[in-house]
Amino acid sequence: VEPYSAFNAALNIFNDGLISQPDRVNTRQVIYYMTDSDPKFNPGPLTQFKASQGIIIVNDFLEKGVIERPGLKELALDGYYFTDIEDNYMSTIRLFGKANCYCRPDTGKDPYPGWSTDPASKASGGCFHAAPIGVPFARTRSNCDDFGGGLIASIHDERKAQFVQQLMNASATKSDYFWIGYSKSYAGLSSWEDQWADTYANWDTDAGEPSSAQ
């Protein structure tokens, strides 16, 4: 399907099925193109769509050595043109999370905006819930999965560390102990639950951190 036909089809879906909900008052319409075809059409309607707070994400499947396609880059909203996204679930979820991301108010989860100041992305860094340690690490992992398909919190920068600390301090249980999503495998390799690799660390080494999950 060429881009303009896909755009019109998306608008029909929005008009037929988009329902406003109280917890999503800032929800924006999002169109996600995965293509390697440079569009040749009048961009006027798409420009108007973006000007009205619509989001157009473009994943340009570039082969090695191929330059960016200017038509596809122009098609995407600023900051939403990508050439290096592999075909994996989490990358796609993060793209949509950047465009629209909320925590349902009935779940007891707090939104973390990360570095975003966009009102439609107030939970672009995820939805979090503080629960006292209480159970072993493996059980906590399964509890998070049962609680809306979540993961034990992974922390990759000081801003997020402070946010998580505030959640723990505000927890009704006032517990001093919470798991975070960092553990060591039987092979002796440590990793975060979300599988991100980074260099951020703020362990209390005097207290023996990071300690082994039990």
Image (spheres, rainbow, N blue to C red):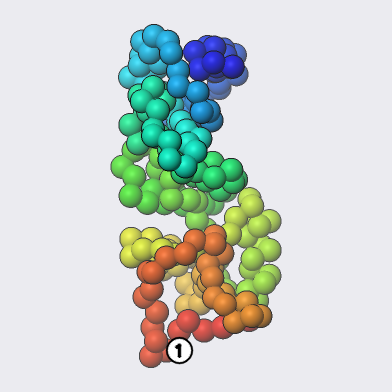
Is residue 114 in sight in this rendering?
A: yes
Q: Nearer the viewer, residue 58 or 123?
A: 58
The picture places residue 130, in percent across and down from the top left corner, at 51, 63
Name which residue type carries label 1. Answer: Gly
The picture places residue 194, in percent across and down from the top left corner, at 54, 60
Q: Residue at x 54, y 12 (%)?
A: 5
Q: Secondary structure at mark 1?
A: loop
Quadrant, the C terminus: bottom right
Q: Residue at x 45, y 18 (%)?
A: 39
Q: Viewed as shown, does residue 41 lie left or right of 145? A: left
Residue 196, relative to residue 23: is it above or below? below
Q: How many marks?
A: 1
Image quarter for residue 99?
Answer: top left
Which residue is disc 1 drawn over?
208
Residue 11, relative to residue 87: is it above or below? above
Residue 192, relative to residue 110: is it above or below? below
Image quarter for residue 186?
Answer: bottom right
The picture places residue 188, in percent across and down from the top left corner, at 59, 82
Quadrant, the N terminus: top right
The picture places residue 59, in percent across and down from the top left corner, at 48, 34
Q: Residue furthest front?
A: 65
Label 1 neighbourhood size at 10 Å, few (<14), some (14-19), many (20+)?
Answer: few
Is residue 170 in sight in this rendering?
A: no
Q: Viewed as shown, does residue 158 lie left or right of 142? A: left
Q: Nearer the viewer, residue 86 or 124?
A: 86
Q: Residue at x 57, y 77 (%)?
A: 189
Q: Residue at x 51, y 28 (%)?
A: 36
